[in-house]
Image (tube, coloured by chain):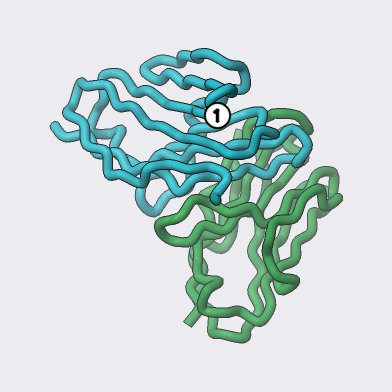
Amino acid sequence: QKEVEQNSGPLSVPEGAIASLNCTYSDRGSQSFFWYRQYSGKSPELIMFIYSNGDKEDGRFTAQLNKASQYVSLLIRDSQPSDSATYLCAGKRSNSGYALNFGKGTSLLVTP
Amino acid sequence: DAGVTQSPTHLIKTRGQHVTLRCSPISGHKSVSWYQQVLGQGPQFIFQYYEKEERGRGNFPDRFSARQFPNYSSELNVNALLLGDSALYLCASSLDTGPTKQYFGPGTRLTVT
């Protein structure tokens, strides 16, 4: 079982809608979580990180963490066609140095 | 400040050859991590170096090795290349220990024929 699981999608949402991206993890030792956006042929770009239960908001993005349910999500409000990309969820153990465990990513398509 | 830089951008090698990939972290960052990303998959952790010492190693064969230099730049070496080594190799830079953020470089696209 992969440590971080994501639905590969594609997830299609209309422009202006809320996109909801989900991620589950199996390693209870994971303490912090990261969302990266990756455009085709490009490297991952950090969007948000979260390590406390609850919500964390940054502009149009909200990350949610529920450690009891081992669930992480990313909400994108007012989705734009430029948000179309693959979104990678990654977890990190507190005692693993800097190794990030990535999911396969969810492909998001925002249609005009 | 300049971001993470990697060289070369693209590389084509033949099976059995050796390759060296290079990475320079963000100024002030002392940690470098290497990841391999095969098409359609998330990045997979290979190595992490902090203050020139190896701090973590992923599940990769001994054909993969790395080092970090006094200026915190890093090299990833892969010997006896296999077709399956074809991937995007990503270098990530972070400041220090703790739950800090990692920033990725543009990557090196390696194709093994």
Residue placed most toward the observer, A70 or B30:
A70
Residue placed most toward the observer, B23 or A78:
A78
Residue A112, percent across and down?
13, 31
The residue under the point 47% across, 82% down is B113
Figure check: A29 above or below A16: below
Q: Amino acid at mark 1?
A: Gln
The residue under the point 27% across, 21% down is A18
Residue B50 seen: yes
Residue B41, percent across and down?
45, 55
- Residue at the extreme left of the image, as rendered: A112
Residue B2 seen: no
Left or right of B19, for residue B41: left
Residue A79, percent across and down?
26, 25
Secondary structure of residue under mark 1: loop
Residue B48, percent across and down?
74, 49
Residue carrying label 1: A70
The residue under the point 24% across, 27% down is A80
Left or right of B86, for residue B76: right
The residue under the point 61% across, 33% down is B1
Q: Which chain is green?
A: B
Q: Colour of chain A?
A: cyan
Residue placed most toward the observer, A15 or A53:
A53
Left or right of A2, for residue A16: left
- Quadrant location of residue A61? top left
- Quadrant location of residue A101? top right
Chain name for mark 1: A
Left or right of B78, for residue A86: left
Figure check: A59 above or below B7: above
How many badges with numbers are in the image?
Answer: 1
Assess disc 1: are there few (<14), some (14-19) or many (≥20) residues with their C-alpha within 10 Å of its C-alpha. Answer: some
